[in-house]
Amino acid sequence: MSELIGEWLIMWIYIGIRSLFDWIKGLILGIPKSKVELKRLEKKWLRKKIFLTKDQENGLKKGTNGIVTDIIDKKNLFIEFYDQNGKLMELNDELGFVTGINQIKLKK
């Protein structure tokens, strides 16, 4: 039990130090934390190959491949999906779809 409490304590100390560092960086460089977070998301997701982990309401099936084309916010991405032949998919006259980050995974 004490090991679990120690791990949680270390985790919260790390989160606090990281938040303090972001706050100081924002003060010194004049960059708001939201912009720093957006840059981090762009580096991780933008123009990367992904696949769906859950079926979508618009008819896209689990396992469909795509490429992230835009970052809407920290929970949603704009993605273009491709069929098995590598051609751009079009559903209901739409070429790109908004999908949650929790519904996709990066392809390795």
Image (cartoon, helix red, strand yellow):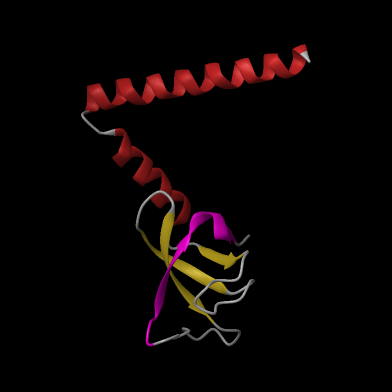
Q: Position of residue 95 (x, y in %)?
A: 39, 80
Q: Quadrant of residue 59?
A: bottom right
Foreground residue among 40 and 76: 76
Using the image, determine if residue 20 lies above or below residue 32: above
For this view, does 92 lie left or right of residue 30?
right
Tell me, yes or no, whether the highlighted magenta stretch contains residue 97.
yes
Q: Which residues are magenta?
A: 93-106
Quarter residue 6 falls in: top right
Q: Is residue 57 above or below residue 38?
A: below
Quadrant where the N terminus lies? top right
**Image coordinates for residue 94, horizontal then vertical, percent:** 38, 82
Residue furthest to the front in view is 57
Q: Does 57 appear above or below 101?
A: below
Tell me: residue 97, above or below residue 41.
Answer: below
Q: Residue at x 55, y 20 (%)?
A: 12
- Where residue 96 sits: x, y (%)? 40, 75
Instruction: Using the image as rendered, state which of residue 56 and residue 27 is in the foreground.
Output: 56
| Residue at (42, 48) in percent of width and height | 41
Q: Is residue 68 left or right of residue 61?
A: left
User: In the picture, which quadrant includes the C terminus?
Assistant: bottom right
Left or right: 24, with 86 as reference point: left
